[in-house]
Amino acid sequence: MMVITLYHFQKRIADISIGNTTLRKQGKGATKVAIDYLKKLPLNKLSNINEGEFVRLLDEFTTSLQTKIPNNSWGAARKAINIFLFQASCDLHLVQEYQLDKIIPYLELPLDNPNAERLKKEAKKEGIKLKWKNIKGLTPEENKELQKYALKYAKEKHNCERCYLDLIFWRSEEIRE
């Protein structure tokens, strides 16, 4: 008889959160590499940490995955980790074991063209210019500026954490205008 473990839940979250389109154009095998990495991400390190510790670990995880992705894109690695951590923080079993609900205020908005373009559009209304070319070329500095604005926008316009903007922006009619 097989025993279901936390690994099975983490593996499932990795498998369903990183689809073929998540890392398209990031090099052959990027999706598999990311999924394999995320299946083994030490979620226990995220239990009961503060924002500074979370940011340090997120940077560490991003750099580690970046070295494994075929095109070595920091942006692609960060996107995959952000998507995975958001999904993991919504899984009852992983939340109970690792208290992942406590990292929600620290989670970033996963950046891709639709999310970044929406942020740029909203920032422009306020006279703020954000830089974005594409996920492959995203730098830590550009990410920091986009995330800073995402945090402000999420709080002021939607009264939520910035990670939830991915749900709000997802196939939004406003983007298609």
Image (cartoon, grey):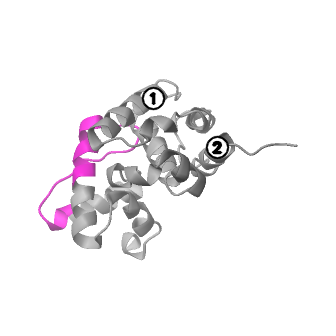
Q: Residue at x 52, y 33 (%)?
A: 42
Going by the picture, which residue comes out furthest to the left? 127
Going by the picture, which residue comes out furthest to the right? 1
Q: Which mark is residue 141?
A: none
Separation of marks 1 and 2 at Cα, in angstroms: 25 Å
Q: Residue at x 39, y 52 (%)?
A: 102
Q: Which mark is residue 6?
A: 2
Sequence-wise, the earlier of marks 1 and 2 is 2
Give the residue type at disc 1: Gln
List x then y, in percent, for residue 30. 57, 35
Q: Is 170 left, or right, of 132 in this rendering?
A: right
Which residue position is annotated with label 1? 66
Helix, strand or loop for disc 2: helix
Range drawn in magenta: 123-148
Q: Is residue 63 magenta?
A: no
- Crowd band around label 2 with a 10 angstrom C-alpha radius: few (<14), some (14–19), many (20+): few
140, above or below 145, in the image: above
Helix, strand or loop for disc 1: helix
List x then y, in percent, for residue 171. 47, 68
Question: For this rendering, which residue is in front, 152 or 135?
Answer: 152
Question: For this rendering, which residue is in front, 34 or 72?
Answer: 34
Q: Is residue 74 visible?
A: yes
Q: Quadrant of the C terminus?
A: bottom left
Q: Residue at x 29, y 72 (%)?
A: 158
Q: Is residue 138 visible?
A: no
List x then y, in percent, for residue 84. 51, 47
Asked if marks 1 and 2 touch (Cβ < 8 Å), the reply is: no
